[in-house]
Image (tube, helix red, strand yellow):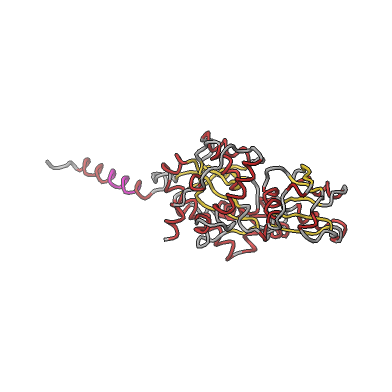
Amino acid sequence: MSLSPKSSKLRKTVLALVGTAALSPLFAQAAETLKIGSSIWAGYGPLYVADKLDLYKQYDLKVQLQFFSDPAMTVPAVASGAIDGATLTYDMVIGSVAKGQKIKVVMPVDYSAGGDAIVSDVSITSIEQLKGQKVGVAPLSPPEFLLTYALQSKGMSQADIQPVSVNPDSVPGAMAGGLKVGVTWEPNVSRVAAMGGGKRFHVLYSSKEAPGLITDVLVFDEKVIEKRGKAIESLMRGYLDGLAYMHSHPTEATAIIAEVLGVSPEEAAEQMAGVYNMTLAEMPKNFEVSDETTSFYGSGRIVSELMHAAGQINRIPATEETFDDRFIKALSN
C-alpha cells in the first residue's frame, strides 16, 4: 500500500522529531543524583572542588552536598535514607557498625597530618613530662585517640595524667585561662601556638606522627552500595578528578575550598596543610591487614579498643564489617 503525499510528509516529520529527540538534552536520560552528607572540613577539599567545577557531569552524575553542623547527625540520616552517603571519621563508622548499622567505607578520603595535636606550655617538651599533668581533651573524640596513641608510644596511659573534659573548640580559651596542656584540631592548634606572641605554647605532638590514625572516609549503607554501585563509582571518579585539579591548579582550588570553609585563601591553605588526601595508588593500603595506622586494621584496633573500654560500644566489630573495597579495586585496575 502506497502512502499519500500527506501521509508521507507526516511520516518524515515524525522521523525528524524522533531523530531530534535522540539528540536533544530535553529528551536525554536525566543524570543520576547522589545526596552526600558532610561537615565543613579542609580534608574534604576534593569534594568541594568537584562540586564547584561540576566534575561529576562527565560521569552522568549530579551530587548534592548537604552540610551538617553536627557530624553525628549524618549517620542517622544515612540510615533513614534521607541522604545516600556521607563523609565520616572512621571511629564513627566503628561505633555505628558495632551498634548494628550497615554502613561501610567505600573510600578513604584524608587523614590528619598535623591537623590534630597535643599543644602544651613550652616548658613541657616530651610526652613523658605529661605525667601528673591536667590535660584538656574531649572524651571519645579523635583528639583523645591521638592522646592515647601518644601515651602508649611511651609506655604510658591516661592513668598517668589527669584528663579534664574540654571540647576541642574550647581548648584555646582553657589554655589562655591557665590550662597547660590541651588536645585539639585546626584552626585551634594554630591559635594556641600563636598566643603570647608564639612564645607561650607549642605543638608537643601531632597527628603527623601517627598518619592514618584519624581518617576521614566516604560511606554508604550496604543497600545503597548494592543498588547504586555505578553512581558511587562515578562519585569517586569525580572526587579523584577534584583531587587532580587541586594538584594541577593549587591556587584556584584553594580559593574554592576557602569559600566553603568561610575563611581567606591563606587560612584555607594553612588548614589544608594539616591534612593529607590519599591518592588512588595509596588508597588500597587502608584495606590491607597491617598494624600500621595507615591501615583500617591498625588504626581501627586502637580506636575500637578505646571505645570498648569506655563503654561506648559493647563489641568490637571485625574490621571486614566496616568496609567494602570493591570500588577501590575496580578503579585501581
295 horizontally vs 4: left or right: right
Q: How many marks?
A: 0
Instruction: Residue at 58%, 55% (x, y): give it.
Output: 46
- Image position, residue 269 (x, y; %): 69, 60
Q: Is residue 276 magenta?
A: no
Nearer to us in this view, 8 or 164: 164
Find the magenta span and give its range: 13-20
Q: Is residue 14 magenta?
A: yes
Q: Quadrant of the C terminus?
A: bottom left
325 horizontally vs 144: left or right: left
Residue reaching furthest to the top: 80
Q: Quadrant of the N terminus?
A: top left
For residue 180, above or below residue 71: below
Instruction: Residue at 84%, 49% (x, y): give it.
Output: 179
Nearer to us in this view, 162 or 285: 162
Instruction: Residue at 62%, 54% (x, y): give it.
Output: 213
- Image position, residue 70 (x, y; %): 66, 40
59 horizontally vs 139: left or right: left
Residue 278, quarter of the rendered image: bottom right
Q: For the stretch drawn in magenta, what is the main secondary structure?
A: helix
Residue reaching furthest to the bottom: 248
- Image position, residue 118 (x, y; %): 75, 54
326 horizontally vs 150: left or right: left
Nearer to us in this view, 166 or 170: 166
